[in-house]
Image (cartoon, rainbow, N blue to C red):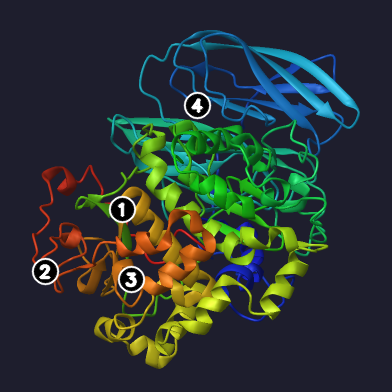
Amino acid sequence: MAMSRNIISLLVSACFLTACGGSSDPASTPAPIPPPDNNLPISQCDNVVEWSVVETTDNIEFLTELAYQTNQPGVIIAKLTDKNSSGMRFQWQQITGESLSLISDKSPVLSFTPDNGGDYQFKLTVSGAGQNITQFVTINVNNAQQSSLAVHSNHQVVEGNNVSVRLASMNGQMPTDINWCTYSGTDVNLDLSKTERPLFVAPDVAQDTVISIRASAEFNGQTLTDDVHILVTKEANISSPYFDSPLARTYAYKANSAYSDRLTQCTYSNSLNSSCTISQLPLIGQQTTNPSISTIMDRVVVSHDWMGRNFEQFLQQQDPHGDFITLLQSVSAIVISYDIRPSFYWVVTGAIYLDPDNLWLTPAERDTINEAPDYRSDFGNDLQFLMPWRHVKNNQYAYSSYPYENRTNRTINDLTPRLASLLYHELAHANDFFPRSVHANLQGPTLLDDFYKRTNNKALISDQLSNFSPLQSSEMYGLANVSFKGETANATQKSYEPSDITSFFRPDHASDYYAYSSTREDVAMLFEESLMSHRYAISRDVAVTDAPENASGSTITVNWGQRGRIGESAIKPRAEFVITEILPEVGSATLVANLPDPIPMIAGKSWLENLTLISNNGFAPQKVSQVQQSLSTPERPLELSGSQHR
């Protein structure tokens, strides 16, 4: 799944239910993995942050900046003078001025970047706790006279949640000599492992509190500065045994959904004390066997509207065969929030949880996503091998790479390969646990009760696959515990070289290393790779390589690898079984019969050099263009097995 520290404990406890295949109690919550210890105090800024305070006749005041200018991130913060904002609903609307992209229009923090000068007026409606207040605020934007430093993004975050902000490049170049300070009274410890992208954990606060941080940097001989403002909100005490670390504020994407009053509470809440019953939140397929996109969207939970909007657009434009609409019948909800990383499915709620990095279309949308790294990033560092993967079509990556430094738009077509593969994978989990064939027989009272009944009878698709065609390599199972579950590698595992891994993995029947993390992941990987090949003619590369320091596509050397491993004769029957059970409409026998034969990689060549392959066991070296070699165009990040899922 992509994900931040705040739900590590959730994921560890969820491990049994989706990815880990263990025998622990799914309701238990082990202690969270400690956060990294590279958070350091930063200096106090020399001056204090200044606001223009706009008071109103109601219990609302607006904090506005002393000056706004074009092409510079701006912010207006609404504060309630008689209470904290928890439990209240905010809705901003632009009344006058050139149209702005208001990505956070349901937050007390309105963030925007104006392209044009002039007056801008906004209407804010605040409702909840028996109140319904509307107020207006007006600002003036000046035309910028020179280039300015820009830090993204001003936003609201709950106390204890992860925070990331990012310094933007200027004219395609990153400023130098970057320094950060915090204003008096707002002490924070920053993780500056990437100086352009500070990370920190929002401190506990007694009341809603604004934390302001200043960046200074050199550009073209000038020292420039910009401030970023984070509203840390006071929240109710956490009572959930499931979600026992702070979660972002979320809400039903469709306010008029019949389930809007319970969606968040049943799927993503710090007060979820027991699984909701099937009568409270049934699977979509229990409601209808022919759902429309509108029916699906009735079950979507988001932290920002753009996430639901882009997900709906994807279903409208990129699901011509209805695969995802069909597979979504086996979930109770779709949760998309800026603090989910990596994506996952969880049987306790029956929902899938999606990392929104797979859904953004504009830089402003991307700015709202927390960049805290996947908590598993350091697992397996003691091992001497890597197993990278990528999606390929016509000897090229099947999707573009979008460095954060390049503030660019993308289209639904651009994000489709990654989002489609993610959905095939996570929905394979949902359909493994509750395929459509059993929906009418689920008795509850909760999905968890039915899960126990099914798994006790070894009735899950993954149980059946493991029974008739189990994976054989005990060595790979052990290594998967290190790479994906954080176990400490023993001396034998640390001594394995890439050639050893090849000898364990190559003759076995797994399509990917991640399949060894659990029988559940074995099913999901088979389904994902088969459907991506069938529907999109996209192949999945997998390889065993060395693990040099600062590994990249051009520095790791392939010991063994294949393109389209799912086409191996020994793997095809396993894939056919899984497809038949999950999506019989697609015609599994014909699909599997038409899977392309695997193409071998050339040992001794780099991962990047193996991007261009030919099918007759030959090799055509990939020519790295001058653009790729340019220092201004970073090499595409390396992706390792399991990185997209949990």
The kind of residue on which mark 1 rests is Ile
530 above or below 467? above
Q: CA distance from mark 2 to mark 1?
A: 19 Å
* Residue at the disc numbered 2: 617
Q: Which residue is at the front of the view, 466 or 355?
A: 466
The kind of residue on which mark 2 rests is Asn
Q: Which mark is residue 538?
A: 1
Question: What residue appears at the point 19 percent right and 53 percent down from the top-left corner?
Answer: 395
Q: Is residue 513 left or right of residue 204?
A: left
Quarter occupied by residue 621: bottom left
Q: CA distance from mark 2 to mark 4?
A: 53 Å
Question: What residue appears at the point 91 percent right and 28 percent down from the top-left corner?
Answer: 130
The kind of residue on which mark 3 rests is Met
Q: Secondary structure at mark 1?
A: loop
Q: Secondary structure at mark 2?
A: loop
* Whole-percent x, y for residue 468 in the image: 49, 83
**Does residue 611 appear in the picture of this structure?**
yes
Q: CA distance from mark 3 to mark 1?
A: 19 Å
Q: Residues within 10 Å of mark 3 (few under 14, many from 20)?
A: many
* Residue at the disc numbered 3: 387
* Residue at the disc numbered 4: 73
* Whole-percent x, y for residue 141 in the image: 52, 12
Q: Which residue is at the front of the view, 488 or 423?
A: 423
Q: Secondary structure at mark 4?
A: loop
The kind of residue on which mark 4 rests is Pro
Asked if disc 2 and disc 4 are in contact, CB closer than 8 Å, the reply is: no
